[in-house]
Image (cartoon, rainbow, N blue to C red):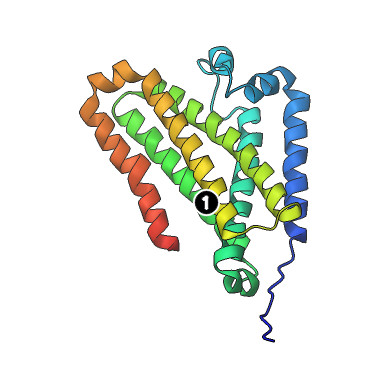
Amino acid sequence: MEFSERIIISSDWATFLLVGCFALFAVAKYFYPRRFQEFSLLPITNQYFFVHGKSDELKHPFNMLLFVTQIISVSIFAYILYTVFNPSEAQNNKWLFVQICTAYSLFVLIKFSLEKIIANIFSLDVIINNYLYQKLSYRNYLGILFFIGNLFFLYIYPPTATSIFIFTFILLVLNAIVLLYSYKKNGDLILGNFLYFILYLCALEIAPYIILYKLFI
């Protein structure tokens, strides 16, 4: 009989972070109950954007609370990926989660800053702000799905390559639907500036993810 080493990685720190995310959800719902209710119905109705999307700021506390939970939830899921596909790295590098969280945060913030700079250069601040607000809202909603997925993989069903691929594929499809919806909603503007749209798509929606993929693979 042959024995294979089973690598067990403690997830106590993840439990504290997930509890922290849950606390942030509770704070957001407590201080902004109506907004939270409209946000929770985002896949069903666009009322959230009609009420808040035009005059609201991206830096609203509600958005920031959910953005923090998004950063934490996505980073934990990325860490889970390492435990499945590269368990030795997850076990030997005690700062792996911090590195993932820092890299993802910088990636999102730098990408956001570049989009704001380009909007300012071409005097498209209002249009781009609305687009970024929609995208941030949908990404924050996906962050909640990442949060649920983390609970599932850490405490209910141990992650496997197959389950991780299925969950990731579902989220990628949802993300694609979100982007397509945003582009459809701004269809007239895109068609009138199609060349700029293609440049934006290649430079800020495709290239950053290719670079990120090359850095980690």
- Position of residue 158 measured from the top left corner of the image (x, y, whole percent): 69, 58
The image shows residue 19, relative to residue 192, as above or below, that is: below
- Position of residue 72 measured from the top left corner of the image (x, y, whole percent): 64, 48
166 or 95: which is nearer to us?
A: 166
The image shows residue 133, relative to residue 91, as above or below, that is: above
State the residue at coordinates (66%, 25%).
40
State the residue at coordinates (33%, 34%).
118
Picture quadrant of residue 11: bottom right
29 or 180: which is nearer to us?
A: 180
Picture quadrant of residue 197: top left
Element under disc 1: helix
Q: Residues within 10 Å of mark 1 (few under 14, many from 20)?
A: some
- Position of residue 35 measured from the top left corner of the image (x, y, whole percent): 67, 20
With 192 as the anchor, is 132 left or right in this view?
right
Q: Is residue 128 visible?
A: no
Q: Is residue 122 visible?
A: yes
The image shows residue 188, relative to residue 16, as above or below, that is: above
State the residue at coordinates (48%, 31%).
135
- Position of residue 12 measured from the top left corner of the image (x, y, whole percent): 78, 60
Q: Circle 1 sits on which residue?
A: 104
Disc 1 marks which amino acid?
Answer: Tyr
Picture quadrant of residue 7: bottom right
191 or 57: which is nearer to us?
A: 191
